[in-house]
Amino acid sequence: MKKGIIGKKIGMTQIFDANGNAIPVTVIEAGPCAVSQIKTKENDGYEAVQLGFMSVEDKKLTKPLKGHFATKGVAAKKHLKEFRFDDISGYSIGDTITADVFAEGDKVDITGITKGHGYTGAIKRWNLHKLRMTHGVGPVHRQSGSMGVIDPARIFKNKKMAGQWGNEQVTVLNLEVAKIDAEKNLIAVKGAVPGARGGIVFIRNTVKA
């Protein structure tokens, strides 16, 4: 059965396996999440389960969201996310999803928002080569040089130029769950996960399985 959960990135650390090898892991506070809505093919055209994560005061919600939670009889949540599953028969509104929905050794895909670096030059954003530092080249050196050609006398689309760097949604595929702490709702995943500490991430079964 396909599984999914919403979590908050705590940070990175390392754990040790039975042979004493250090394994870098990202620790995620996964859940508890409440099932706030179930979508079916008859009503919505597709099957999905909507999960809510982190409690929030009603006064911080818009009227539509207040009505949404009131009609479902579920406590208000700060973050909502839909997970499309082939079979949703095992879920009911009000169910609680915790970290132990996954197990050690599971392969997962994790989606998050990367760190934002603001408006950044092409050298730092794309790691382009700098101009020569001598022989009359200057006064600017940290620029990418010529952007176009004489014919057709324009810059092609997708040219690597200065602009916004980071603050975009990224999914890392096929990560392995290294450890589960069900009591504290913690999941340790091998490797790095997109986003800064405290960022919201979405965990689901890998599509490469």
Image (cartoon, rainbow, N blue to C red):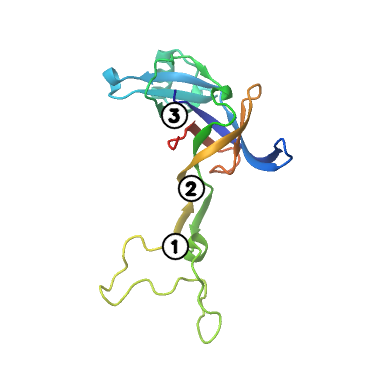
Q: Residues within 10 Å of mark 3 (few under 14, many from 20)?
A: some
Q: Name the foreground residue: 97 vs 174.
A: 174
- Identify the residue under disc 1: 162
Q: Which mark is residue 179?
A: none
Tag shown at residue 81: 3
SS assignment at label 3: strand
Q: Position of residue 175 (x, y in %)?
A: 53, 39
Query: Quick one: which residue is furthest to the left in this view?
Result: 152
N-terminal label among 1 and 3: 3
* Residue of label 2: 167
Between discs 2 and 1, the one toward the N terminus: 1
Amino acid type, residue under disc 3 in the picture: Lys
**Which of these two is toward me, 83 or 21?**
21
Quadrant holding the C terminus: top left
Sequence-wise, the earlier of marks 2 and 3 is 3
| C-alpha distance separating marks 2 and 1 | 15 Å
Q: Is residue 196 above or below residue 119?
A: above
Q: Position of residue 49 (x, y in %)?
A: 41, 22
Judged from this view, the residue extending furthest toward the right is 20
Q: Residues within 10 Å of mark 2 (few under 14, many from 20)?
A: some
From mark 1 to mark 3, how far is it between C-alphas?
32 Å
Q: Are marks 1 and 3 in contact (CB under 8 Å)?
A: no
Amino acid type, residue under disc 2 in the picture: Asn
Q: Position of residue 79 (x, y in %)?
A: 49, 29
Q: Residue at x 32, y 19 (%)?
A: 40
Residue 55 appears in the figure: no
Residue 96 spot, x, y in % from top left: 52, 17
Q: Amino acid at mark 1?
A: Ala
